[in-house]
Amino acid sequence: MSIVVTGATGQLGQLIVEHLINRGIAPAEITAVGRNTARLADLAATGVATAVVDYSDPASLAAAFAGADLLMLVSGSEVGQRVAQHTNAITAAVAAGVGRIVYTSAPKADTSALILAPEHKATEEALRASGVGFTILRNGWYTENYAATVQQARETGVYLTSAGDGRVASASRTDYAEAAAVVLTTPGHENTVYELAGDVAWTGTEMAEALTEVVGRPVVFTTVSAEEHTAILTGAGLDGGTVGFVVALDGNTRDGLLAGGSSDLATLIGHPTTPLVDGLRAVA
């Protein structure tokens, strides 16, 4: 078996490589690809093959995918460019004769109003149209996304959002990476879509309680309106694009779009997902 993992120099991709090796895949059967040459060198030290690729460079993709049985297509990070980049990767995989592509998407990408969903929906459509076998992992929210929140809570004693009573079923990256490794190394996942999320959909109050435990001081949950949140973030010096994204995402959270509801993640990995407080403690 030959497995290519894209985005392997990113946090999720590196963890997927680790979990593949932990599941008994020989490093020589794994090709880790990405843009960061220093991180690729670190991966090469584990015995995996490596290649420098760019989603925007079809020639680099064709060379890296040659001879691969499976492609782990970790979604790109460049918002606004991902559809073209992912399509390049899918096209190269089809040309290389890859048997199946595993893709990291977003919750309910084909129907959700989530601000992140449109590019993932378009990628899923391109994947289905390609004719290649696929497994779609609709990854929910990562607990690690709250690393800055932990620091702010430590400094201010406040967890402030405009998400209201919206719940978030987050899980740690290692949970999602393990799920990816499972579907890459076990049968029965062909042309399947999984909705992945943490076991517990927590509230803002529960986040504040977890933060209190992690940072060692009382943390108060404070919810504000979208307009107030915009003003606060702007006053803190954030650029307009970032402010708009954060406020829109909190609105999505308020509307329940990150609340999970599926047990697919725990079922795939065979154990409970990482509890919120443990995920936060890991990035504290």
Image (spheres, rainbow, N blue to C red):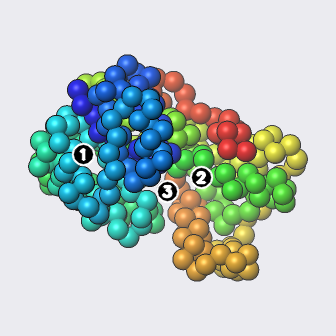
Which residue lies under the disc numbered 1? 64
Q: Are marks 1 and 3 in contact (CB under 8 Å)?
A: no
Q: Amino acid at mark 1?
A: Ala
Above or below, comparing residue 127 to residue 172 in the picture: below
Which residue lies under the disc numbered 3? 257
Q: Secondary structure at mark 3?
A: loop
Percent of width and height locating residue 247: 59, 70
Residue extending farthest to the right is: 217
Above or below, comparing residue 104 to residue 224 in the picture: above
| Viewer-proximal residue among 273 and 146 | 146
Quarter of the picture containing the C terminus is top right
The reply, left or right, for residue 147 in relation to residue 240 is right
Q: Secondary structure at mark 2?
A: helix
Residue visible at 84% across and 57% down? 155
Asked which quadrant contains residue 241, the reply is bottom right
Percent of width and height locating residue 203: 67, 50
Asked which quadrant contains residue 76, the reply is bottom left
| Viewer-proximal residue among 197 and 64 | 64
Q: Amino acid at mark 2?
A: Asn
Q: Earlier in the sequence, mark 1 or mark 2?
A: 1
* Residue 139 in sight from this viewpoint: no
Q: Earlier in the sequence, mark 2 or mark 3?
A: 2
Which residue lies under the disc numbered 2? 145
| Viewer-proximal residue among 249 and 156 | 156
Residue visible at 44% across and 29% down? 46
Q: Are marks 1 and 2 in contact (CB under 8 Å)?
A: no
* Residue 230 in sight from this viewpoint: yes
Q: Residues within 10 Å of mark 2 (few under 14, many from 20)?
A: some
Q: Residues within 10 Å of mark 3 (few under 14, many from 20)?
A: many
Quarter of the picture containing the N terminus is top left
